[in-house]
Amino acid sequence: MLRALVITMLVVAGVPSQAPESRRNTIVVFETDQGTLDLEVDGIHAPITAANFLKYVDGGFFNGGTVNRAVRPDNTVRHDVEIQVIQFQIDEARERQSLPPIPLERTSVTGLKHLDGTISMARNGPDTATRSFSIAIGDQPSMDFGGRRNPDGQGFAAFGRVVRGMDVVKKIQALPTGKAGPYGTESLAPPVRIVKAYRKPA
């Protein structure tokens, strides 16, 4: 009775309610053919982005996916505002099952910043992020709200960090890249295979 009353009050006040699932941090394991990463998904500060990401993990979308992009100073296609990241994609066979885009949780609101090891949603315009995400190598302030990486200045949605496996991230970033992939000279050649992704057992 009391819980229902609280939810009703939040809705009337215009505040969206969040299930307990999205209001906690969760460790997700990514096993790749180059090594294993543990990611801490921040459901406290970025609940919308975290909940969306966990749906893809729980649904097995990343199993058989790839890390297909590695951006570094020697291969970047943008020299005006350079960043260093690697980027993850779901299994291509599952792309048609992708979930709807989510609202952009700006770093100016979440308080999260693109520091070394930050995980962040890839996007085009604001509110277009769906399934692809990146990991920052080194601090990347141009990806924060107000940064110059995107012309709109809205930045990317940071939603957690690598807690184990930054050596694997750097190893992947240093792998050969070429022009054959979707990201031109930033495309990993060949892509790194994601064996599976899952929540780490408690």
Image: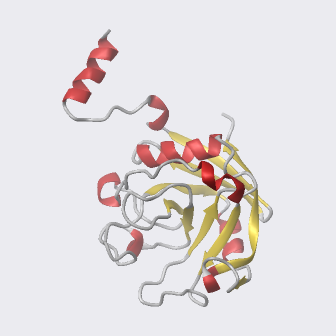
Q: Residue furthest right?
A: 33
Q: Is residue 142 above or below residue 5?
A: below
Which residue is painted at 70% across and 72% down in the image? 172
Which is nearer the eye, 97 or 191? Answer: 97
Which residue is painted at 55% across and 65% down in the image? 134
Which is nearer the eye, 54 or 108? Answer: 54
Which residue is painted at 49% across and 32% down in the image? 21
Task: Quadrant for residue 15, please give it.
Answer: top left
Question: How was the colour assigned to the protein in this rendering?
Answer: secondary structure
**On-image quarter of the N terminus:** top left
Task: Quadrant for residue 190, please give it.
Answer: bottom right
Left or right of residue 81, residue 9 in this image: left
The image shows residue 80 at horizontal and vertical percentages of: 42, 89
Q: Is residue 68 above or below residue 80?
A: above
Left or right of residue 85, residue 168 in this image: right
The image shows residue 7 at horizontal and vertical percentages of: 30, 23
Q: Residue furthest top?
A: 1
Q: Residue furthest front?
A: 96
Which residue is painted at 22% across and 35% down in the image? 14
**On-image quarter of the C terminus:** top right
The image shows residue 68 at horizontal and vertical percentages of: 67, 70
Q: Number of numbered discs present?
A: 0
Task: Quadrant for residue 19, please give it.
Answer: top left
Q: Is residue 82 above or below residue 131?
A: below
The image shows residue 173 at horizontal and vertical percentages of: 66, 75
